[in-house]
Amino acid sequence: MRPFSLIMALGVVFLFSPSSAVAQEVLCENGVLENPNTNQQHACEGMKLMSHVSPSEMGFATGLNDIWGWSDSETGKEFILSGWRDGISVLDVTDPTDPKYVALIPRTQGSLASTWRDVKIYQNHAYIVAESDSGPSPHGVQVIDLSVLREHSGDRIVLQPVTVYDDVWFAHNIVINEESGFAYAVGGSGGNSCGGGLHAIDLTNPAAPVFAGCIIDTRTARGYAHDAQCVMYNGPDVDHQGQEICIGSNENAISIVDVTEKLNPKFLGVGGYPSAQYVHQAWLSEDHKYLFQNDELDELRLTSIQNTRTLVWDITDLDDPIMINEHFSANESIDHNLYVRGDKLFQSNYIDGLHVLDISDPKNLTELAFFDTHPQTFTSVWNGTWSNYPYLNSGAVAVNSDPDGIFILCLASQDCSGQASVAIEDDLGIPSSFSLEPAYPNPFNPQTTIRFELNVSADVRVTVSDALGREVAELINASALASGMHTLQFNGAGLPSGTYVVRMEALGQLLTQQIVLLK
């Protein structure tokens, strides 16, 4: 592990920061949207463009890869960390219509530029990996203290690591279970690579990671994990409730492992299928009953599969995953990363752009919206959107697209501006409204009051989700609730400190509000 000075860790290197692109919210109409930043026409449906930042505005031409986000519980600010070949660009997207390029995180000194760079967040620290087969120096896992951005304004700064964890030299990806406080480098090489399987890292001290064990599922191909999701399991399989479960995408199959004991993992189910070409990435439903998976190469290699295919697994028995659905898009494209928020699946499908699916019925997925981030007609199949981050408290979705830039998008049915009220019309066309009042107190510990007003009777559901979009409480789910002011209580006594989002659904609209639990 290589320590860095406090001066460098505080990012005191300042660079001139050009103005970011400011895009007025633009609604998709009649299947097309014109980007005011480029004047390009984007095919779309059911989406709004909040803003767009081109690679040139961030000082490079191409090479975008992965993306993640950070919502600061102290200030309420929201940031996007966008990977590219030489580092990470940090954008302040607190106002989704006015992103600001605030910081650069360069690659580890001596390491090579990489097509594959990945980042995740834990307790205000970013953990960054890159994949490479060689180089004069390992990249390791960079640990970046993001709290310096809380009070930052003005020119862009350069953030340097507080340390570099170099027990593993290179990794394709990094996974973090925020509930357990463990990270997992996957697809590793060099150092203690764990054979490319799960390289577990203890983040008890976020600034000083410690090796915790290797988890290699030799039942799958070569035991290599290309990607994974690790959670504290709260699904219906009573044999494993409360345990830490990792689901790996291991090239030829999904791998389900109980990693509660890092030095004594319990290997549970394996899910393979005859047409597997490259099991690339997967994400759980919030109730941990289903797994949504992509296969990156099936559309490219198999003549029988041309349109984008999404695979759905029933994992109610973790020892015996069962594939229950193959959903085919209307379009032909390779798929890459996908993420679940609520009852929606957000897919990055390379040249075909971002697709949003309704997954409330896992056996019958339906497309709700899409946005083509890469409108060029002749291009490489590897261009377009690699990944997206749908967990911003504003409700916006950040999408990386190479070589097109970063798009901040919003479902047309949602308000992603941070406003807490919306105008609607009832069936008679008579204007009416409902509003979500500011929670009080906010910040709170452990209880806060949430009030909302209806001008008409309506079906109402109010929930609270954590920063990753996982539902932690349902406050009300009522049919034909009477008009008037209504009061709810939310108690966070059993939850960790952090930023949470109140989500109110009524009359076909969604309102959100950020609340902060401080213990």
Image (spheres, helix red, strand yellow):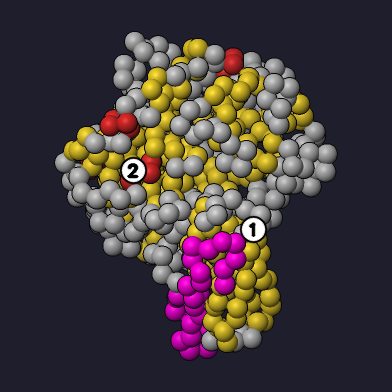
For the C terminus, the quadrant is: bottom right
Q: Which residues are magenta?
A: 421-449
User: In the drawing, does residue 281 fall left or right of residue 480?
Assistant: left
For the N terminus, the quadrant is: top left
Of residues 16 and 331, the one drawn nearer to the viewer in this rendering: 16
Where residue 490 appears, as percent x and y from the top left, is 62, 66
Give me the residue at 64% from left, 43% from top: 284
| Quadrant in the picture for residue 3 | top left
Where residue 275 appears, as percent x and y from the top left, is 66, 28
- Above-or-below relation of 123 to 94: above
On residue 493, which mark appears?
A: 1
Label 1 Cα neighbours within 10 Å, binned few <14 / some 14-19 / many ≥20: few
Where residue 181 appears, as percent x and y from the top left, is 58, 36
On residue 267, which mark appears?
A: none
Of residues 101 and 410, the one drawn nearer to the viewer in this rendering: 101
Identify the secondary structure beneath mark 1: loop
Identify the secondary structure beneath mark 2: helix
On residue 148, which mark appears?
A: 2
Of residues 473 and 286, the one drawn nearer to the viewer in this rendering: 473
Give me the residue at 71% from left, 42% from top: 233
- Looking at the image, do the residues carrying marks 1 and 2 touch, with CB atoms under 8 Å apart? no
Does residue 30 appear in this view?
A: no
Label 2 Cα neighbours within 10 Å, binned few <14 / some 14-19 / many ≥20: some
Q: CA distance from mark 1 to mark 2?
A: 29 Å
The amino acid sitting under disc 1 is Ala
